Image (cartoon, rainbow, N blue to C red):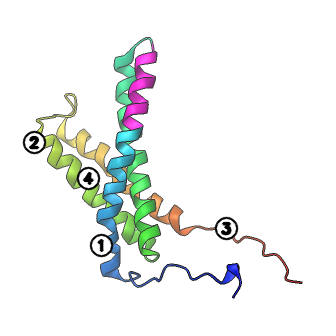
Amino acid sequence: MTKNNKKRRPTAEATLQGAIKSALPGMAASLVSALVMMLLGTLIALLCPDPGAAARVAGYVTLYLSAFVGGFYAYRRCRAYPLLCGLYTGLFYTALTLLLSLILRFDGAGLSPALAFLLRLPIIAAAIGGGVAGAYSPKKPRKRRR
């Protein structure tokens, strides 16, 4: 048996329930990536002349990119239903951010509730985009066997 005939990970989780089960590890991947990106964003913001303005932008970029990473990871774990993997991950991640904002009494920097809600909708869209991006894999040219 040659090296090219290695078995891929089985797609036993390629069901609708697997999409939900893969959303929780996707949310965990979102949190880890958010932590790393927030540390980098803080460093970048501190190097700017006005750290306050850069901190808000870095926060939103971190929030949306980490949702994208979570959707990507959820699809790669499930290997089916990219839209649902991203949707569930985005919903779980949005629920977590809402829960944390209630616990920590964070009011969204004085934003109206409607605007705060509208700023959380792209979290779901970014996670769905991550799931769809995870499903895309370009065809690699295969080498001819001699």
Mark 1 or 3 closer to N-term? 1
Q: Earlier in the sequence, mark 4 or mark 1?
A: 1
The kind of secondary structure element at disc 4 is: helix
Residue type of the residue flagged with mark 2: Ile
Which of the marked residues, 2 or 3, is nearer the chain's N terminus? 2
- Cα–Cα gap, marks 4 and 1: 17 Å
Q: Which residue reaches farthest top?
A: 49
Extent of the magenta region: 37-48
- Residue linked to disc 3: 138
Q: Kindly identify the residue that appears in the image at 34 percent across and 18 percent down.
A: 52
Q: Earlier in the sequence, mark 1 or mark 2?
A: 1
* Quarter of the image where one finds residue 42: top left
Circle 3 residues within 10 Å: few <14, some 14–19, many ≥20: few
Amino acid type at mark 3 = Pro
Q: CA distance from mark 2 to mark 4?
A: 14 Å
Residue 106 position, x and y percent, is 16, 34
Q: Is residue 1 above or below residue 62?
A: below
Q: Residue at x 11, y 35 (%)?
A: 105
Task: Check disc 4 and report the residue beneath it.
Answer: 94
The amino acid pointed to by label 1 is Lys
Where is residue 131 drawn, in percent x and y?
45, 64
User: Which residue bears the numbered disc 2?
Assistant: 103
- The residue positioned 21% from the left and 52% from the top of the image is 96
Task: Look at mark 1 in the image and give the residue it sits on.
Answer: 21
Q: Is residue 63 visible?
A: no
Left or right of residue 41: residue 2: right
